[in-house]
Amino acid sequence: MSLKSIAPGIVLALLAVAAPAMASDYQLLFLLQLLMMIALAQSWNLISGMTGYVSLGHTAFFGVGAYAGALLLQWGFPWWLAIFKGAGIALLVAAPLGVLTLRLRGPYFAIAMLGLNEIGRLVATLWVDLTQGGDGIPLSPARLPTLLQNYYTMLTLAVLATSLIAWVRYNRLGLELRAIREDEEAAEMVGVNTTRNKVIAFALSAVIPGAAGAVYAFYTSYIDPVSVFAPALNIQMIVMVLLGGSGTVWGPVIGAVLVRTLHELTWAQFPALHLALLGVLIVAIVLFLPKGILSLAPWRRRVRPDRAPGSP
Amino acid sequence: MTEPLLTINKLDAAYGPVQVLFGVDMEVYRGEIVAIIGPNGAGKSTVIKAVVGLLKSRSGQIVFDGRDIIRLPAHAVPRLGIGYVPQGRIVFSHMTVTDNLEMGAFLIKDREQRRRSVDAVFAQFPRLHERRQQAAGSLSGGEQQMLAIGRAMMLDPQLIILDEPSLGLSPKYVEQIFEQLEELKAQGRTLLMVEQNAARALTLSDRGYVLELGRNRFHDTGRALLADKAVRELYLGGR
């Protein structure tokens, strides 16, 4: 990877670091949500964009992280440790699950993940002693990190998620995942350990949603089962990735910026219509831009004769 | 006589509850071309899938180069020196021809060595060189088959296994593929193939195995099988 290719990322990150000095609290909250969606979309991109295994339940990890973060904070852990543990617990859920579900191909995996999210939601609803069920968990303001702390934590997660995608993509693992997406059997035949690679990608893709869930719990200071185990959130991740360009480094960032901006501009005026807009957007992408906005860029060619697999 | 490169010993194999192979025995010596022929459903491709690890449910012995490989998963097989050309020309259709070949040598970390392998394949298949920047999915069926063979040769394997290399190709390309196989034979490579074009396959082969309903039926030199009255009547549609 050359300096030139990461320069836009560095500029963006610096702008995001400087933003709190200029932004109002409302604008900062908007940016915080945008950064959260970038982090989530990139995580979805890692498993679904890169391997072609579409996850309809990545919010399961977000929800697990949110509940872990909220409960640990209540039990007296400092907020930053609660975030780490939220990510760790999401990883602990994902790794064995990946071993089981990634044997399922195509729609079966997607449905299994949808089921996982539902299980998470039901556990959070029914295990009242731990989660206070459908009432949700309000967090006491005294223990919560400030908006600024939440903002910088989320920025870190978005940068980490994007760097992870860049690192994987220009590495051997990325090539192996690409081969899996192209044709899993052929990948196996040339010596790619498909099961191991899928599980690694899946486990990595669960960590950041876990952490992001915890931060979400802190900045909203209240969570309930429906708001964190939310299929609509998963749909947003998918739209952002597809809109920008699946499997790419910058596609999900572009997609997240566009969708969140569109949402911001429309939700107040058209509270019902903005969801319909999202639907129209999905249909339009599938019909007219199946490879995402990045595929329109003139400097991008589909073939890369200059680059041999496995080379950095 | 020297040790065979590949020995299949009392191989049983099943798809789920359905047993397909019953104690199949086979040997392939270095430098030899061996054909497996037989009617549909005889288990020809199943033998190959069992050898390359694509079929989990199998028992018996598969000894390659002195080592029993029957428990190995499919992704560990290329490393041993077995190149596999699957049925149905499975290529990475959105990758270029060059990238497809590079994927074939994906286990080699040294870039220069990979490039040399690619050049060697291009030398053997000039047509692939002409199409090197094209997406593999845009090639004709015959060219995709060449690409699949080329990819299997990238690690310079000791044994190349081909599953129905001429299946579904136009007569012109069937001709070309067999010419390529002749060429591999002339280079002294070791080939094990399943082929529905039994007469062509036996003509090319040193030895042949005839399977029927998952069991060994006949086994002889290619020439002898071609001449055998029973084999001709049953499997070659002959007079």
Image: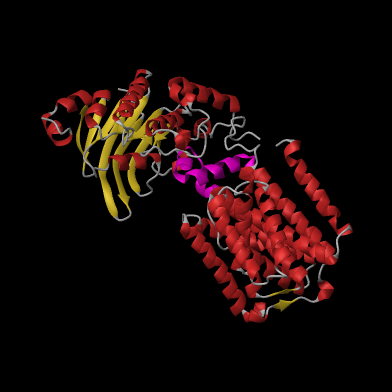
**Magenta span:** A169-198
Residue visible at 72% across and 71% down in the picture:
A70
- Let me know if residue A249 is in the magenta part: no
Query: Which of the pair A270/B128 is nearer the observer?
Result: A270
Residue visible at 51% across and 25% down in the picture:
B118
Query: Which of the pair A141/B99 is nearer the observer?
Result: B99
Query: Which of the pair B172/B177 is nearer the observer?
Result: B172
Q: Is residue B2 above or below residue B230?
A: above
Q: Quadrant of the C terminus of chain A?
A: top right
Q: Quadrant of the N terminus of chain A?
A: top right
The quarter of the picture where residue B9 lies is top left
Residue furthest right in the image: A21
Question: x, y (%) of residue B6?
Answer: 35, 32
Is residue A198 shown to the viewer in this render? no
Q: Magenta part mainly helix, strand or loop?
A: helix
Residue B227 relative to residue A186: left or right: left
